[in-house]
Structure formats: structure tokens, C-alpha cells
Amino acid sequence: MSIIVFVEDWNNQFKKASFEAVSYAKSWAELAGTTVTAVTSSGAADPAALASYGADRIVTIALAATPYGIAQQLAAMAEGAAGMVIAGTSIGRSIAPALAALAGGALSTNTTSVPTGTAPVTVVRGAFSSKGIETIELIGGLPMVSFVPNSVGIQERAGAGAVESMDTAGTDLLQVTEKTIASGQVALPEAEVVVSAGRGLKGPENWAMIEELASVLGAATACSKPVSDIGWRPHSEHVGQTGIQVNPNLYIAIGISGAIQHLAGVSASKTIVVVNTDAEAPFFKAADYGIVGDAFEVVPQLVNAMRAFKAGQ
Amino acid sequence: MNLLVCISHVPDTTAKINFDAAGTALDATGVQFVINPYDEFSLTKALHLKEAHGGTITVLNVGGPETEPTLRKALAIGADQAIRINATPTDAITVAKELKNHIAANAYDLILCGQESIDYNGQQVPAMLAALLNLPFVNACVDLVIDGSSATATGEIDGGHATYTGNLPLVVGGKKGLVEEKDLRIPNMRGIMTARSKPLQVLEATEHDAATRAAKFVKPAAKSAVKLVDNVDELVHLLHNEAKAI
């Protein structure tokens, strides 16, 4: 009756969302008085590392190629589980609902808290594009949680950590013909710091200073919808409703007015900084800190100030 | 092609969101409802596919009579017929099971959903539906090419894209990129007139038990007023010492 957590790897390496998923499962297991079973790819370089975050049993499997195949593999292991945890990464968001359908689960997605109760399992999630916060009870089936990466954080707590391998098959209904992942960049959905810019930058040739600020901060770059619509930046950088929703510790918005569609994708950020020439820009109402000023003056100064700060750490 | 587009009826993006006195449901008073923005990309993609390959577009929704104007709007945009499954949606699995019952009994080549609806933001129904039907599924779909009975679909993954091929029928969770924003269709007068005479069929629901229950909705705490600073050094100082963000 343990909590089963699926631990995703990227090119055989664990990332922050991997450890956060195990931490999540451990918090749940402590509340429910049970253990944590972590399921991960047999290709993962260091499965034993999951023990430091609370995994009592670590099961490696030859992962199917598609989310549906992985959901079938996890469903085969679900019988007798007390609950299941999956990080809300792009792959996790495809696996979790399929798993719930296959294994008779009661699923909360977009979850931002660890369980606050176990009878029934109760968690908190975002709804109405960040305009509502829902407390949801998982009543009809195996409780399952998909959480927003970077919402509950990592905690180091030792688990027994026995590693074993298991044979389990899943049927992929699709062939993966190509996978491209931009290397050397911080992936937007899991970034702890995001530097985002909008039409105030006046043209795509002016993005070098945004990229420089992101590089100094180890941040991902993002943009507003108009900027991706006119092709200054790729669609994959568009944050907001119909784009990517982000949840970083720090979101720096430069030259973005703050339309409601944009705020829907960023208002879960813990700290928001807005730089805009227009003191009346609606984004200032959603911001924690603001500078009313010209991006072309403020951003180069901010790059220098951040670089000096980082050098002093 | 026999194309199906699943439509959610959701509060407009700019709507003020309030909850009822018990705090367990949306207070719809004064709220303007629209076609879920993600579904609009899927609907326009269906129109493009019909123009290229021929066929019929059915739009399908699980909801009460109050959702019919949203289905009529989809008909005005260009869908050929609409079906409303008469049930109040309670959670994702109940909606997915209602959709599955209809789809399993009808031969659709392609089932287009939006990646998520902007009300409950679950991003659950399309993947659940595909699993219940044992059909292939591509989420966050930003490109889709149909060639005879096979499909090539590209979905966004963290930091990049994955491209899949497989046989129809296929379920996709669409979003911007499936078609461009500028290509989204809006109803014209002729569309609105012809929509009135297009078939809108109401099917009775088959009653499924919900797996989850909304215990409480609250609005996020109001943000305290922005702290305006004059220079970047002060900003860095505050981000480090006060916000602990760097």
C-alpha cells in the first residue's frame, strides 16, 4: 500500500522535477503512514539517488516510448497502491490522465500543494486560469496527483532506497519519429527564473540584452503573445493563456503591458518584476516590484547590477 | 473525413470569476461564456482538413441547455452538425466517459479537442478519452498532417517538440500552432444565418460517478501594491533580501 511515484529522466539524468516528485510522494507517505515506491527508467544514470529524497523502493523499468505506453506500464503496477504521483511536466501531463482512465484513478492535476488530508485525500489546485484556487477531494478511486513543477519544492529525507528492476510492457500506439530539444537552454516550464519581453522591445534585433540578462540569472527567456504572433520570437516562448503557463520563483517582465491573457500564464509566479515606460500599464497591478522606465536604459543597467551581485555571492 | 471536435463552454477570458455562497461552484451570474480558446484552434484545423480532404465536421459538447449558444457559434464558424450530451459536467472522467460512449458507437477518423479548458485547467479529458477508447493521442499538438489513413502529429514537450506517426483514428489536444491565431475563423452573417438550420441533436447522458469533488473554491489573495523602485541596485537588493528570489 505504498505511494507510487513516476520519476521522469531527461537523457538519463534526473532534474529538479524528478526529485520534487519523490519529495512530494514522501510528504504524502508520511501523512498516510506508508512508504514510497519510485518507478523510473532503466536507462536512468543513478536511480539510487532517489533514496535521498525519500524513496524506499526504487523500481527500474524499460520505459515505453510514448506517454500512453508508460501509462499502461504504471497501471499494471497500480493495484494495491495507496496513491500515485506524477510531476506535471509535458510528458507527465499526458501520462497522468491516461493512467487515471486505465487504473480507475481519482486525479487532481495542476496541483500546487501536498495532501492536507487523507480521508479523503485532499489537495489544492489552480483553476480558472489562476483566478480561482480549488480544494479538491479525491473520492472515487485510487487517488492520483499531478503537481505543478516548482510548486512544492525539494526536501531531502532519507528512504531505504533498495533498487530492483522489473519487466513490464506497454503498447505504444504511435511511433516517435523525431524529438528535438533545444540544448543549452533552461526549459521554460521548469525554470526558476524567467526573463520575458514584449512589444516594448520594438524589434527582434533587440533581444540580445534579454538573452544576456537571462544568461546572467540562469533564466529561461519568454515573450508575450503579440511578439510570438508577429514572429519576433518562437511560439515555444509564448507564455500566457494558449501559450505556456509558468510558475517560477522570479518572473521579470520587460516591455509587456500585462493583458489578462498574459497574466493567466504568469500570475502563479512567486515574485513578479515589471519594467515598463507606461506607469499605467496593467501589469504593475500584478507586480511585486516595478521600475517605470525605458527598457533600453534599464535592462543594460540591470544586467550589470545582477552580474555584480552574482560575482559577489 | 469524419471529423469530431469536442467543445467546452467556458467563461470568457476577461470574465470576473466569482463563486457561489457555499464556495463550491462558479457563480455564473453575469458571466459571458465562449468556445474554449484552445478548442477554437482545433475547430479551425477541422475546417482546414475538411477543405483539403472533404468530409463532415461534428461538434460535441457535454453540458446543459445553456451551452447550446456555444455549439451554435461553432456551427456558424463552419461545423456541419452539433451534438449536446445532456449532463452537467462534474469532473473530467465523467465527461470523458460520456464522450467515449458516443465516439465508440460512431466512426470518427479524427477527434480534435483543445489541450485544456480555461475553466478548470485540468488538461485531463483528451488523454482520458484516448485511453478509454484505446486510441493514439498527441497532446499540446502544434502540427498535424493527414495522409490517407495515417497521421503525423507534432506536440510540444518541455524545451522542444516530438513528432509522432500512426494510424487514424487519432485524438489530439490542440493549441495555438495547430493553426495560426490569424487564421482562426469567426462567424460571418451568412454563417450565423445557416447555423440556425443546421442539426443540433441532444443525447441523454449515461450517468457516471465522479471521481473527484470540489470542496471549496476561493479567489487568490489580492496582491499588495507594487513597490516602485528608482534604480536597479535597489531592485537587486530587494529581490535578494526581501523577496529572497535571487
Image: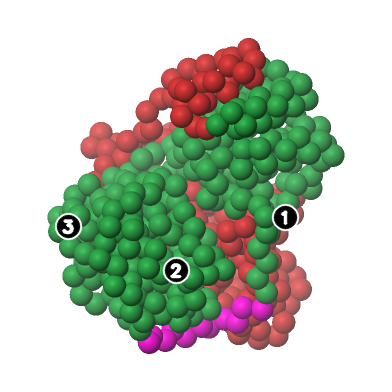
Chain colours: A green, B red
- Magenta region: A167-177
User: How far apart in space, not on screen, are marks 1 and 2 (Cα)?
Assistant: 42 Å
**Quarter of the image that includes the C terminus of chain A:** top right
Q: Are marks 3 and 1 in contact (CB under 8 Å)?
A: no
Image spot of residue A102 (x, y percent): 35, 76
Pick the residue in front: B199 or B225: B225
Task: Report the residue at 66% width, 78% height from top.
Answer: A177
User: Would you say A188 lies left or right of A48 here?
Assistant: right
User: Would you say A133 lies left or right of B82 here?
Assistant: left
**Quarter of the image that includes the N terminus of chain A:** bottom left
What amino acid is found at the position of numbered circle 2 in the picture? Asp
Q: Quadrant of residue B174?
A: bottom right
- The answer to whether residue B7 of the structure is visible from this angle is no
For disc 1, the neighbor class at 10 Å (few under 14, some 14 to 19, many from 20) is: some
* Disc on res. B180: 1
For disc 2, the neighbor class at 10 Å (few under 14, some 14 to 19, many from 20) is: few
Image spot of residue B205 (x, y percent): 33, 68
Task: Report the residue at 18% width, 53% height from top.
Answer: A31
Q: Quadrant of residue B208?
A: bottom left
What amino acid is found at the position of numbered circle 3 in the picture? Ala
Label 2 element class: loop
* Disc on res. A32: 3
Q: Which residue is mark 2?
A: A46
Q: Is residue B205 above or below residue A177?
A: above
Instruction: Kindly report the secondary structure that dominates the magenta region of the rendered protein.
Output: loop
